[in-house]
Image (spheres, rainbow, N blue to C red):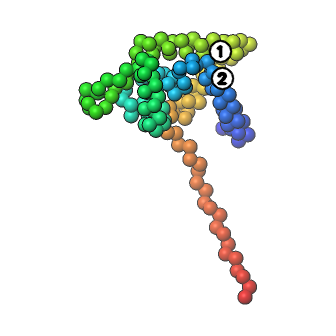
């Protein structure tokens, strides 16, 4: 088991990953905000699904999911059709235009990494990929279930009653 200081450093480094994510968000086309890109990515990875499942995978409220879906549908990146099993529900699926956009986003992302990490060796990049995959695996896929992040419970310190002199 690693030392506590190493876990603290890991937490610090992972919080800094936000800067990497913000840099990657800058390469998104103006008409494709991050929420829409996430919708498209999940539909590509998991296939067609109901909005409720997409909301679970995004780990956001249904109203937020609905806004992202409406934005993507208005641009023709996804289509919504009646669910044959429940006509009140909609099935979401990626369109060819949505796949084209995802292909473009993947190309842009790959180009950014290639430019930014041009002084890294193939082994360095491979090791980072393996370790990040292992980290995700250790936590479980949070898109499918929530990891147990609760701290071990420790008994609260019992306060000694203060006696006042009378």
Please rate how many residues cluster around mark 1, counting C-alpha atoms within 10 Å: few if below 14, some from 14 to 19, many from 20.
some
Give the residue drawn at x 59%, y 13%. Answer: 108
Viewer-nearest residue: 57 or 69 = 69
Query: As drawn, is 90 to the left or to the right of 34?
Result: left
Give the residue drawn at x 49%, y 24%. Answer: 36
Indicate the position of residue 161 as horizontal and vertical percent values.
Answer: 67, 75
Indicate the position of residue 159 as horizontal and vertical percent values.
Answer: 66, 69
Please rate how many residues cluster around mark 2, counting C-alpha atoms within 10 Å: few if below 14, some from 14 to 19, many from 20.
few
| Up/down of 74 relative to 111, above or below | below
The furthest residue to the bottom: 166
- Res 152 seen here: yes
Quarter placement of the C terminus: bottom right
Figure quadrant of residue 95: top left
Between the residue at mark 1 and the residue at mark 2, the CA separation in whole angstroms equals 9 Å
Q: What residue is shown with label 2? A: 23
Q: What residue is shown with label 1? A: 112
Who comes first in sequence, dot 1 or dot 2?
2
Q: Provide the secondary structure element on which disc 1 rests.
A: helix
Give the residue drawn at x 63%, y 26%. Answer: 21
Q: Provide the secondary structure element on which disc 2 rests.
A: helix
Give the residue drawn at x 43%, y 37%. Answer: 62
Viewer-nearest residue: 116 or 39 = 39
Indicate the position of residue 77 as horizontal and vertical percent values.
Answer: 44, 18
Q: CB under 8 Å between callouts 1 and 2?
A: yes
Label for residue 81?
none
Viewer-nearest residue: 71 or 166 = 71
Indicate the position of residue 131 as horizontal and vertical percent values.
Answer: 62, 25
């Amino acid at each position: 088991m690693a030392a506590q200081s190493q876990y603290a450093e890991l937490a610090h480094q992972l919080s800094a990953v936000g800067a990497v994510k913000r840099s990657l968000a800058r390469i998104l086309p103006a008409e494709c905000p991050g929420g829409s890109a996430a919708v498209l990515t999940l539909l590509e990875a998991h296939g067609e699904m109901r909005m409720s499942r997409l909301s679970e995978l995004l780990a956001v409220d249904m109203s937020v999911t609905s806004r992202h879906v409406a934005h993507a549908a208005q641009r023709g990146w996804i289509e919504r059709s009646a669910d044959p099993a429940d006509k009140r529900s909609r099935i979401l699926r990626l369109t060819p235009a949505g796949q084209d956009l995802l292909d473009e986003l993947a190309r842009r992302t790959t180009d950014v990494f290639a430019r930014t990490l041009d002084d890294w060796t193939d082994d360095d990049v491979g090791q980072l990929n393996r370790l990040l995959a292992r980290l995700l695996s250790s936590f479980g896929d949070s898109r499918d279930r929530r990891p147990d992040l609760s701290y071990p419970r420790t008994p609260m310190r019992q306060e000694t009653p203060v006696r006042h002199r009378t």
